[in-house]
Image: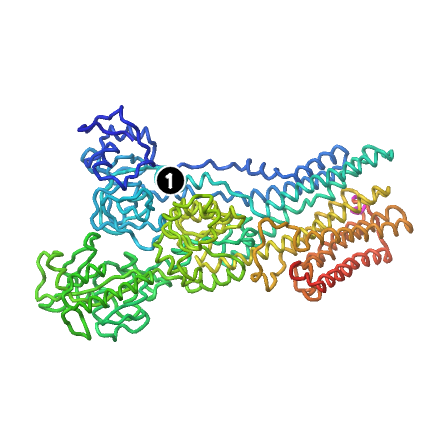
Amino acid sequence: MINRRPGGVDGLNTRSTEVKQEETQFHMLESEEVLKRLGSSKAGLSAKEAQQLAERHGKNMLQETKAKSLLAKFIEQFKNVMIFILLAAAVLSGILGEWTDTIIILLVVLLNAVLGVVQENKAEQALEALKSMSSPLARVRRGGQVAEIKSEDLVPGDIVLLEAGNVVPADLRLLEAASLQIEEAALTGESVPSDKSTDVLSGSNLVIGDRSNMAYMSSSVTYGRGVGVVAATGMNTEVGKIAGFISEEETDVTPLQKKLDELGKYFTFIILGVCLVIFAVGLLEGRDLLDMLLTSISLAVAAIPEGLPAIVTIILALGVQRMAGRKAIIRKLPAVETLGSTEIICSDKTGTLTLNKMTVEKVHVNGTTMDANETLTTAPGGEVLLQAMALCNDSSIDEDKSDDQSKSGKALIGDPTETALVDYSLSIGTDKRELEKRYPRKSELPFDSDRKLMTTIHEMEAGHYRALTKGAPDVLVSRCSHILINGETVPITEEHTRQITASNKSLADEALRVLAFAFRDHGELPVSPSPDKTETGLVFVGLVGMIDPPRDEVRDAVSVCRAAGIRPVMITGDHRDTAAAIAMRLGIIEDDSSVLTGRELDEISEADFAERVSDYSVYARVSPEHKVRIVKAWKKKGKIVAMTGDGVNDAPALKSSDIGVGMGITGTDVAKGVSDMVLADDNFTTIVVAVEEGRKVYSNIRKAIQFLLSANLGEVLTLFIATMIGWRILEPIHILWINLVTDTLPALALGLEKAGSDVMSRKPRKSSSSIFAGGVGVGIIYQGIVEAALTLLVYHWAHTHYDEGIAVTMAFATLGLLQITHAFNVRSNTKSLFQIGWFSNRYMLGASVISGLLLVLVIIIPGLNDWFGVSHLNGLQWGIVCAAAIAIVVIVEIVKLIIRLSGKGKSWD
């Protein structure tokens, strides 16, 4: 910043010390000191000063990150160990003249790359959305004159004028505030607009929601007017800091991606080791160099599950389609799998667990507190209370719209607190529109944050006027001289006051926002009404308690989460009591001992918090930085963390979590832009549905991996043993055909397997758990051995009875059909096919028929079989092949029976 010379107006003090915008605690300074530090005055900056400051600070805009080009995304798809090996195999095949193998391998690699680019091409729009939230124009005072300029041209020190309906164009320190209210839910998470003032505040660690003398970029003015001096612009604003978090935060790889990377490393060593052994043995035996190179390529191709990346991608994509039909929109494909391993769901309160709509919950009238659903119209004094709720109110009814979330079904416009009062009145038959026609407003005293009251004066009938007042209970009661009891006005006593105070405390203890109502009758319309005259000698009518209520279905969803081993954590910018009350209603906590505020969190070191994070399930009055810190603390414990949210303030945590879940209806574009998944219905229950689908998808991916790797192991063992013996059993084209055609369709069918009935009663898998746990690794090994043994047995039998061509063809057909029938085995590691049902997955039946036909056709179609190097088979030969294919089902069924009898069935499935 540049300080103005003392007493100077236009000159700049070049010798002054620069002050960084983000280091100054403007809320702690007097207005005059703020202006001095910013080098401004109430008359505003001069044109020259503004220009110089603009050159220093730049545009009042958010920086954009450079998007990756399509070519860069395409190249990234090849940064995979298995892909490198496949490309090497393709090159060697071409050198050796095996162009068919080369073409097929390259097609597989290109298909995988294209699928990856299609998924990654959904570029994030988070920073663009943040940018679009800024007000395009701002009214400023420069050189004593009011002008309208582009908000991007604002500089620190500019004087900005605010009124209802404006979007705040930069971070401001308020100099004037007349009944000013600003809606900051997207930044703070609070359900209702914040009252603003110009009072100096103390405390350098105040969260945004408590800085009542500040107005922040992208928030909106809902009531009153104000004047503020620009304290920060662009990336130095609170929204800018969030943008910084978004751009700096790197996206972690998902658990599945980690496991597949591990898999690639294992395969690299295995493939290279086996190929080197085979190559060396062959050379020692005096075999041809080129022949051994071709054999090594065959082994590499057999070992690499080249279809695995594509299969995993497609299974995830199928899961995405199913989830979209259930209101969960996946923006980033790996999010499906990550959801299945989620252990912690950090959820924003406002709009996610609650309706983000203030609702009347309790009323106190005639000395009695009752639930809002009880009949107020028949209670003594109830009619007058309803009259005050509807008439002392500036909200209106939108005639052209409806709202399913409101009690009355009507869409309302105005302050959330006032719309809640009108909505309640409408729901029990008191229509604001009719009352306004009958009792027109003649005068008013607008709400003022200093006196905490609002009064409207209505003509009840000729010569009879009534002043209706609402406001803070403690303030309003102090101005009452009477109370309405049993429909009669009687002097208020100390006992009455004690009873009202007790009722107010009781409602407040339930985290309800409480308003008090009163009236005063006049024989004539008060001339020039003032608080001193009009808001004294009032008749107390009652209290109304409101809250942003939890969604009806969320409590059940929380219960399901707990049963599934998932811990829900509430993170909100709202007050401690409100957060605790909502959390207890939802079953997230039992008492307020596990509630922590942002200020308390600031006092805990990173190391201590990492140890103690599991002690807390609710966080209140937090800032965006706190949310990120909480998410990262859970991640340090090795937990897979999902973060739900709808506001700008949630964006950094959404980005830094393992999976960010945005709200589709109430969510800001920023929150949706950084999310991995968006809930189309804003329903927390949909997260449970998504978790179930994620678990199902991961289970099916494991089945596909088990199927593919056991098949590949069978191929490797078959080739390895055959080569060591000296048999020339299968060519690279045979292996590729089996892998690309025979494996692919059954593997996809496994991706469509139905979820088990107990999928949501199991604990989440640990991120550290191996992809081979739960019987997958054991299944891959023994099933691969069985496949190899059966294939070699058939080849040996055929080789002793027929020529080399028939023996190779029978081995090729056996290995292919073995894998087709084996796909049925891996539908479960413990349950018998007779328990699951042979026909319960119709996709598997279709895949088996198609794969079987494709395998058989290359053998029986003349010309095609020559290209593949195979021969026709007779009935006996086909019978031997089919018997071997069925044998693997029998063997695996016996193993499953042994597993069930041993009591390991539950842990292995």
Which image quarter is the C terminus in?
bottom right
- Can I make out residue 382 in this image? no
Residue at horizontal 41 percent and vertical 58 percent from the top: 353
Q: Nearer the viewer, residue 283 or 804?
A: 283
Query: Secondary structure of the magenta portion, mostly?
Result: helix
Q: Nearer the viewer, residue 673 or 179?
A: 179
Q: Residue furthest right?
A: 801
Which image quarter is the N terminus in?
top left
Q: Nearer the viewer, residue 695 or 444?
A: 695
Residue 319 relative to residue 530: left or right: right
Residue at horizontal 37 percent and vertical 37 percent from the top: 235
Locate residue 199: give its quadrant.
Answer: top left
* Magenta highlight on residue 838: no
Q: Nearer the viewer, residue 376 or 495?
A: 495
For label 1, the SS is: helix
Q: Position of residue 773 (x, y in %)?
A: 65, 53
What amino acid is labelled 1 in the image? Gly
Please name the residue that numbered disc 1 is placed on: 240
Residue 644 relative to residue 470: left or right: right
- Give the magenta range: 863-867
Task: Please determine whether, in this image, residue 480 is positioned above or below residue 729.
Answer: below
Residue at horizontal 86 percent and vertical 41 percent from the top: 726
Figure colour scheme: rainbow
Residue 31 relative to residue 757: left or right: left
Q: Position of residue 271 (x, y in %)?
A: 73, 40
Density class for disc 1 (Cα within 10 Å; few <14, some 14-19, many ≥20) is many
Locate residue 548: give its quadrant.
Answer: bottom left
Q: Position of residue 758 (x, y in %)?
A: 59, 63
* Magenta highlight on residue 866: yes
